[in-house]
Amino acid sequence: MPTPRSTPAPRTALAGVRVFDGHRLTDPTTVVIDGPVIAPVGAPVSGPVRTVDADGAVLLPGLIDAHVHLNDRGTLEQLCSHGVTTCLDMATWPPPRVASLRGLRGLTDIRSAGTPAIGPGGLHARIPGMSDEAIVRAPEDAWRFVEARVGEGSDYLKIVLEAPGEGGPDQAIADALVEAAHARGTTVVAHAATPGAYTVALDAGADIITHMPLGTPLLAGEVGRMATAERVCVPTLTMMEGIAAARGAAEAFAAASRSVAALHQAGVVVLAGTDANATPGVPFAVPHGESLHHELELLVAAGLSPAAALRAATSEPARASSASPTAAPSNPACAPTSCSSTATRSPTSAPPAPSVASGAAASSTPPPASSRRRRHALRTGRARDHLRAPRLRRTHLRHRRGAAQLRGRGQPRPAGTAARPRTGRVVVGLRAGDDPARRRLRGLRGGPARPGPVQPHPGPVHGGQLRQRPGALRRRLHPTSGDRERPVLGRVVSAWLSAYAPPGMVRAACYEDPPLFASELHTSCGQSIRQAIGPVFALFSTYLGDQWRIGDWAGLRRAARHELPPPLAGFLEAGTDGADGGADEPPQNMKEYDPEWARAFCTGTATASCDHARMLAAVKVPVLLTHHFRHVDEATGTLVGALSDLQARRAGELISAAGQRFDYRSFPEMGHYLHSIDPACYVATLREWVGSLPEPDAAP
């Protein structure tokens, strides 16, 4: 007798549903659920299907709780029943318990720190059942501890820090633990619930800091350090609120909320984590699952937008949990998921690091120092594209070798030839690859009748790096060493060089339409970046993503029409319609632009160590400032352009007060990139100005 065929499960189409994809809320669309698979959003519907009219309802992806403590399978069931499809466990032991909770079909996926590193006299050392192996007593024990955790399969390292003198690992031990973990390519999470512990975590270089001190808001300097170093914060406001309530000190929690607001405004990535636990002896028991919904409410109350709060529980923890250089990069976008065993798993669940999952035996010998430095450099690289990082490193080394060969380094000078006089450089701001302007500038380079070479600055260089290692820029001041994948911050970096370069390196500087003051998050003159190009940069970051990982150009254009102030929306349209890429494709200059720079500027990270007024007051060479198109909207005060007339005047006042010559050329009808739009005009202006400079003193 033939066996009857099983009837396939009917497909369901959710029509008119808005999807939060981990970054933004889409327009109403159709989502098809086909058995265990959720089809790509917006895919065409064919064949028999049961349609459900969502009527504009919102479909959320699976949520990620970035700070929990696991107990047993029931913990995962509780999380799953509240839509938490992934959790980051911040200390569970022994290792067999953690292993038993991994990969359970239909339940919440986990990442775990395993056994935490604690001090001998802190609060956590008194938790019942705490493993003696968790105690790290000396810096010499750090490598052994980290190797043991890696061998057990921990996904990251958890360090429980206390204020100095309160029994936690001291600064030397914390430093050693972070160094050992980073040498193994492992992310470090630091527990820091007091101001003193927060300072220890920052000084040690922890990647993620969890909890938020009660009673006293974080200092502005600490907020700035978090932003500049690109640290990640998991404030666990639900736990902090519970502790404050248990102490009868509601005002103490208000301080923690203000700290979160300050971090968010400074551009620090904030993750949603609850510290959910059922551990005896802890200050407050936070329930698993439902507490994450309350955490989102507290984040919104602290100043995050609803969309930012949802990102803190979806795409941002997915990105942070896969930030190890040994981990495969994850897709930051979150597809709609469910805890049902018949639904797709959330792609926000970051894959485990291969070196951890392999369970390789722990090595008792640390890798050589050069290896540790190389891994640390890759881990802290701005791109955070770990598959590309080695290739980019090799490319950078080739550029350096090529530049050295062109300069003749390491080669003996031919007999009878004299050393070329060191006359300094005239630094200008050009993007890499601007060949027309570069060819025209060759006539200004060298020769007895010329005052010195004109040198396009290849960048990019952060201002703080210039002050810390100005001599390193000698290797960067060569056109062959430019990074062709990123735009050059030549305008502001030219200003940095004119102020802080060592004597003899720079003779004069041309600031080509520089965004002075207008690119600062907190400025002392005129519009800040929030009142200028900042909203456009925020859209770049949201819709294009770092290194174009999202690349939703059409979505960016749609969002610009209703999210940008009218002057900026019109400016963006004018800059893309009719360009070489067309309205449906980004123009070429945008394709060469890395939106990570946009995020760095609109969040204030790029200018955190670059006070423009202080910099201009320290200028030591003559300056030419070319000022291009600018317009200030009377209704909104929005600046369209790099800097306003007021800001240009203020720059001239500061440079003149520093005792330096300041020349100003106005091109009110010219676009931002004069050297690309009209190279002949740019070079003629520069030639005329350089020719007016006094002859330098030639020195051997």
Image (cartoon, rainbow, N blue to C red):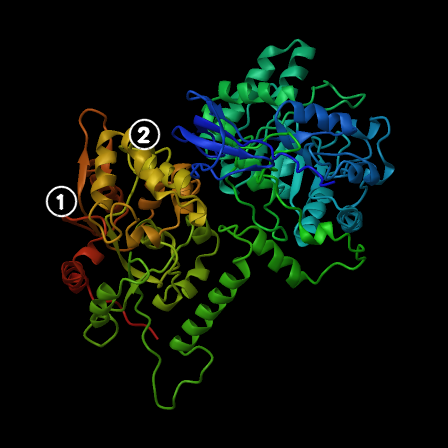
For the view shown, which residue lies furthest in the bottom direction?
A: 415
Q: Which label number is shown at residue 668?
A: 1
Report crowding for label 1: few under 14, some 14 to 19, many 20 or more residues within 10 A (C-alpha). Answer: few
Query: From the viewer's perspective, is residue 697 above or below residue 137?
Result: below
Tell me the tag on residue 487: none
Q: What kind of residue is marked 1?
A: Pro
Front tag of 2 and 1? 2
Q: What residue is at 49 percent from the left and 41 percent from the top?
A: 228
Q: In this view, does 296 lie to the left or right of 612?
A: right
Q: Which of 542 and 38 is in front in this view?
A: 38
Q: Which mark is on residue 563?
A: 2
Of residues 647 and 390, the one nearer the viewer is: 390
Quadrant (top left, top right, bottom left, bottom right) of the C terminus: bottom left
Q: Where is residue 181 in the image (x, y as percent from the top left)?
A: 69, 49
Question: Under tag 2, what secondary structure?
Answer: helix
Which image quadrant for residue 340?
A: top right
Left or right of residue 378: residue 138: right
* Residue 151 percent across, percent down from the top left: 78, 50
Residue 589 seen: yes
435 to 671, vertically: above or below: below
Residue type (three-letter) at the residue carrying disc 2 = Glu
Mark 2 vs 1, N-terminal side: 2
Task: State the quadrant of the N terminus.
Answer: top right
